[in-house]
Amino acid sequence: MSGTIVADLLVDGLKRAGTPRVFAVAARGDRRLLDAARAGGLSVTLVAHELASCVMAGVTGDLVDAPGAVLIGDDVAAPARALEMLDGAPLIVLTSGHPSTVPGCKETLGVEVVSAAHRIAHAARLAMTGPRGPVHLDIASGTASAAAVPLATSCRPDPPPYPEGDVLDRVARALSSASRPLLLAGLHCRSSDAVQWLRAFAEALPAPLLATPRAKGALPDPHPLALGVLGVQGVEERLLSRADLVVALGLDTREADALPAACWSSAPVLALGPAALPDGRVASAHVIGDVSAIIEELAVRLRDKPRADWDVAEVDRLRREGAARGAGDGLFARIVRLAREATPAGTIATVDGGPHRTAVVTAWHAVAPHELLVASGREKGFALPAALAAHLVHPDRRVVCFTDPDQLGVVASELETAARLAAGIVVIVYETGGTDGSVPMRLADKAGLPAVAVESEVTFAQALGRALTTAGPALIVARS
């Protein structure tokens, strides 16, 4: 690579890690890195706000299963706020001449001329190593344009080991003895192979399944064994009181740590997947390895296992009760259902934290992973940047963004980004009261987005139909 500079090495490392683009705020950060990205074939997306750029990079990383990348300027508080909403998404936070630690990052790494290739490789691997999360990479002042020598370094984490046979035998014996196993699915169940094996495993036992928010859709929501999302619909307590074995499949370390205490104490726990268990959590058996490989090996060992003895009627009743309790029957829940029914399979929904999160998580049926992107934590401003990131990763799919005036106001400038990108996003703002001159309507007008306010299911359905035929973004304010 003749005339290679440090910025070129960083871009090359990101590309080899699988990163599809770099996010940045216009006129901030080291422009030499962005120039190198464009020259090296790595997409650059400029947005209006650093909080949004960090959310978009983190969501991108989660969607493509590779580190997201964001270049920030002086606002090191923005990544910390974004990271609270991202729940451990793989992300590389790039700065220039700001070696101080960025709160929430797994590690801060300094880039010098001689260390550039190693640093970007280490950052990419660390971001993807469980528990996944953000890594801060600071480029020393004046370093980005310095000449450098390319080095061949691996930018992807090592694959998990193949599951050990003796531990698999213990797990198979425990499953064979269980009458009512309960499955808990986490983010490592989202690959195409894992999804197929997970469904076969649940049906073969058979056993009801609860998913973490990030694993929603790993078993399609319409499936009779899909009992909803952990901690959302309120059915786990009754399921755990009946279960005689809990099987935690593909949970990330953070997900395992966030499980209700009853998940670890009500019945023996089998932990299956690549992630380490969090401190203080003990499983009866822990098989480390790829979820697909583990289930494939268990299938042979469980061929003659007696079928589980769950009461089918009781499972169905819990499923329906959880759906009714989680979504409710208010106007907003009915709007979410209408939006789901009106959009094709593969449509992606995003939702902020706050009072409407539960209704969307429950009522938006996902038939595959990554069809619902949910904020964690209490920070505001997730849904719109997440929708933009989803559009950039999947430009052929529609995205529906559920938010409210308060959440939208934090990242309102990204409505102009949506217009500039001609993103196929329908922004649905749930507003209590309000007038035609309310904040969401003014924001849409300023950004040049078509917008309409509705107050009933009928007018919402009509407005949504028009919005879905619009080439770019559109905004609907649903008032109660």
Image (spheres, helix red, strand yellow):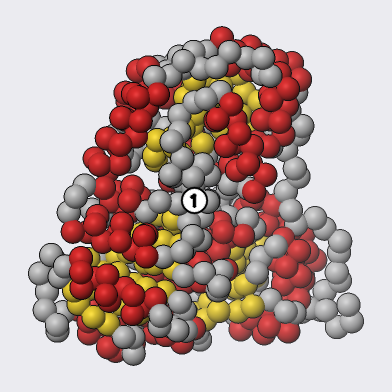
- Amino acid carrying mark 1 in the image: Val
Q: Is residue 389 visible?
A: no
Q: Left or right: where does residue 305 sit relative to residue 2?
A: left
Q: Is residue 370 visible?
A: yes
Whether residue 122 is situated above or below residue 467 in the rendered picture: above
Q: Position of residue 462 (x, y in %)?
A: 27, 75
Q: Residue furthest right?
A: 2
Q: Position of residue 141 (x, y in %)?
A: 64, 76
Judging depth in this view, the residue of 257 and 195 nearest the camera is: 195
Residue ID for mark 1: 367
Judging depth in this view, the residue of 7 and 57 nearest the camera is: 57
Neighbour class for label 1 at 10 Å: few (<14), some, many (≥20)? some
Q: Position of residue 369 (x, y in %)?
A: 53, 51
Q: Secondary structure at mark 1?
A: loop
Q: What is the quadrant of the C terminus in the image?
A: bottom left
Judging depth in this view, the residue of 418 and 378 nearest the camera is: 418
Q: Residue at x 31, y 57 (%)?
A: 337
Q: Residue at x 56, y 56 (%)?
A: 62
Q: Quadrant of residue 229?
A: top left
Q: Left or right: where does residue 370 sit relative to residue 470?
A: right
What is the number of callouts on the image?
Answer: 1
Q: Quadrant of residue 167?
A: top right
Q: Position of residue 46 (x, y in %)?
A: 52, 81
Q: Residue at x 15, y 70 (%)?
A: 455
Q: What is the quadrant of the N terminus in the image?
A: bottom right
Q: Residue furthest top?
A: 177
